[in-house]
Image (cartoon, rainbow, N blue to C red):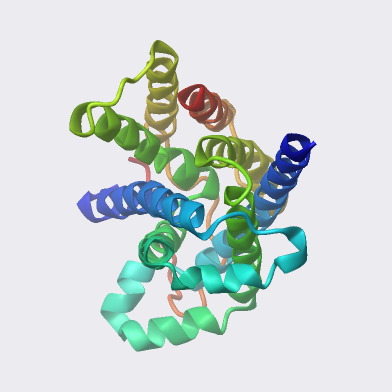
Amino acid sequence: MNVRKYLVLAGVSVFAPVGDSLLSYGMKQVGNVSLHDLPDLLFAIANPWVGIGILLLLGFFASYMTALSWADLTYVLPASSLGYVLLAFIARFALHEKVSATRWLGIALVSGGVGFVTSGPELTRRPPQPQINRQPKAAEHS
Amino acid sequence: MHHASSNLNAWLAILAVVLASSAGDVLLSRAMKQIGDLGRLRAERGLSFLILLIIRNRYFLLGVCCMALAFYSLLFGLSWNDVSLIGPAAASLTFVANAVAAKIFLHERVDRRRWGAALLVAAGVVLMAL
């Protein structure tokens, strides 16, 4: 693991929760969508908050695919869940919201899971021969 | 009655998000492993070559379709219930579903450390939403 890889994981962590929150805010403005009017969901994109949320989720997608190109799925997912913790800290210290004891316990568990998985190797299986690179890198151990 | 149907729709959406996003994650992971390290490829062959390589990969295309399905299921769910239910429920169940799917379909070595991490994060996400 090097700085570039940690930055990619940070991108996955930050873009997803912030993008989801913006989508949630926008969808509350759009209102309930009934099962019979599913095409209405396509027009939800016109809401600016939904639009910005989608842009951030595109940033998430690019970082996520980059991370998956050199690490296992079962490494990337827990390792990038630090975003939930980040959101809780923003709620507590920037927005001065009350964070309950249960929520702090949840933060501790998520952080424990992140620490647990990032202390191990990011790749457990040699990838199949890539289409371009004829000499795939062997599994790296951090 | 309205509350019950609202809850049912929300949980149907959560189920759809979990299934579609796990399938999408597995397909994308397979596609990216097939292509190789994106950072190195971009440095060696350029961004446009890399984009062409990615969008021509069938696992990637299938994965994106699954992700789109998951995304619209999420939007549908969010229109029926709060993000504090939909987000954590879908996310925590997806962590567990992904660990199972990665073991079966990607043959990743999901050892005790990885199971532990997936379960800790899944439980933590639920607690944070309470």
The residue at the point 55 percent across, 30 percent down is B122
Could you tell whether B96 is left or right of B32 in the image? Answer: right
Evaluate whether residue A129 shows in this view.
Answer: no
State the quadrant of the N terminus of chain B.
Answer: top right
Q: Is residue A49 left or right of residue A89?
A: right
Compare residues A1 and B18 and report the one nearer the observer: B18
Q: Of residues B63 and A70, which is closer to you in this image?
A: B63
Residue A76, relative to residue B39: is it above or below? above
Quick check: can you spot residue B13? yes
As drawn, the residue found furthest toward the front would be B1
**Front residue of this view, candidates B105 and B7:** B7
Image coordinates for residue B120, horizontal then vertical, percent: 51, 24
Question: Compared with residue A108, is residue B90 higher up or lower down, i.e. above or below?
Answer: below
Q: Residue at image x 66%, y 64%?
A: B69
Q: Position of residue A19 (x, y in %)?
A: 39, 55
Whether A98 is drawn above or below A62: the answer is above
Front in this rendered view, residue B17 or B39: B17
Left or right for A125, reference A3:
right
Q: List x then y, in percent, for residue A133.
A: 43, 75
The answer to which quarter of the image holds residue B57 is: bottom right
- Residue at image point 45% right, 55% down: A23
Whole-percent x and y of residue B106?
65, 53
